[in-house]
Image (cartoon, grey):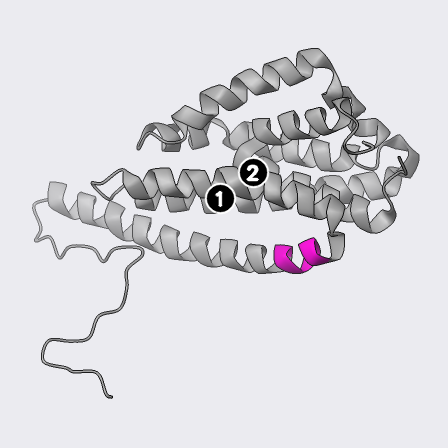
Amino acid sequence: MNALDMPQLLALAAAIGWASGVRLYLVVLLTGLAGYFGWVPLPSGLQLLAHPVVIAASGFMVFIEFFADKIPGLDSLWDVVHTAIRIPAGAALAASVFGADHGAMAIVAALVGGGFAATAHAAKATTRAAINTSPEPFSNVGASLVEDSMVPAGLWLAVAHPLVFLVLFVLVLVLSVWLIRKSWRFLKALFTRVARIFSGRPDPGVTPAFQLKKNPPGDTPNV
């Protein structure tokens, strides 16, 4: 099996860094399985992930995270705890794509991969916190399942079609920044509302973070 070329390495480093901010343990498990079964010729810096002990440990954590991430409230607590884990791990894994043989590229990959992991984690954490303000649990589970599917799809696309992945990745980054801004504004308004209620001032309410636009009463759409 041929070694990965430079476009594949760049795409893989970006994918691993970003995906680590969403599902770190799933990234480790899938990368390890790909190397263990010979699906992908892992760079030397990532070959340790194919060790059976690492695969078993990451598989156990994937099992725990799969359920923890689908329980409203617990998922946000899980995100808070993993703020100090996902970002440095994403930077380290991205750097490992290039390893010691490409020292300068490894440093760049660590910096950029850590930034991608931070962006993905922030988008995930703020969006899920906003979704958790809804009383129904289905949107939470749906968002979690989307995240579950995006990680393996992104990793596969980075290796199989790196140029396509890089184009889609730019769009995902733009969407992530938009989600962070939208969710943070909503959460800030929610915190202000809670403080207003406890201070005894009138409660003006808060606009939902994500909603479909509706026509005003009496306003009929043009045909």
Q: Residues within 10 Å of mark 2 (few under 14, many from 20)?
A: many
Give the distance between the C-alpha atoms of the residues marked 1 and 2, in whole angstroms.
8 Å
Q: Is residue 117 visible?
A: no
Residue 20, disc: none
Which of the image's four quarters has the C terminus? bottom left
The relative height of residue 165 versus residue 27 in the rendered view (above or below) is below
The relative height of residue 216 versus residue 27 in the rendered view (above or below) is below
Name the N-terminal-most of marks 1 and 2: 2
Left or right placement of residue 210 versus residue 81 in this view:
left
Magenta span main SS: helix
What is the secondary structure assignment of the residue under circle 2? helix
CB-based contact (under 8 Å), mark 1 and mark 2: yes
Residue 21, disc: 2
Q: Residue at x 68, y 36 (%)?
A: 91
Q: Residue at x 44, y 54 (%)?
A: 179
The quadrant in which residue 24 appears is top right
Residue placed under numbered mark 1 in the picture? 122
**Residue 17 appears at what percent x and percent y?**
66, 40
Q: Residues within 10 Å of mark 1 (few under 14, many from 20)?
A: many
Magenta-span inclusion, residue 35:
no
Q: Is residue 156 visible?
A: yes
Viewer-proximal residue, 66 or 188? 66
The quadrant in which residue 206 appears is bottom left
Left or right placement of residue 98 versus residue 84 in this view:
right
Dot in front, 1 or 2: 2
The relative height of residue 212 versus residue 116 in the rendered view (above or below) is below
**Residue 72 appears at what percent x and percent y?**
31, 33
Task: Give the residues in magenta.
Answer: 164-169
Left or right placement of residue 117 versus residue 109 in this view:
left
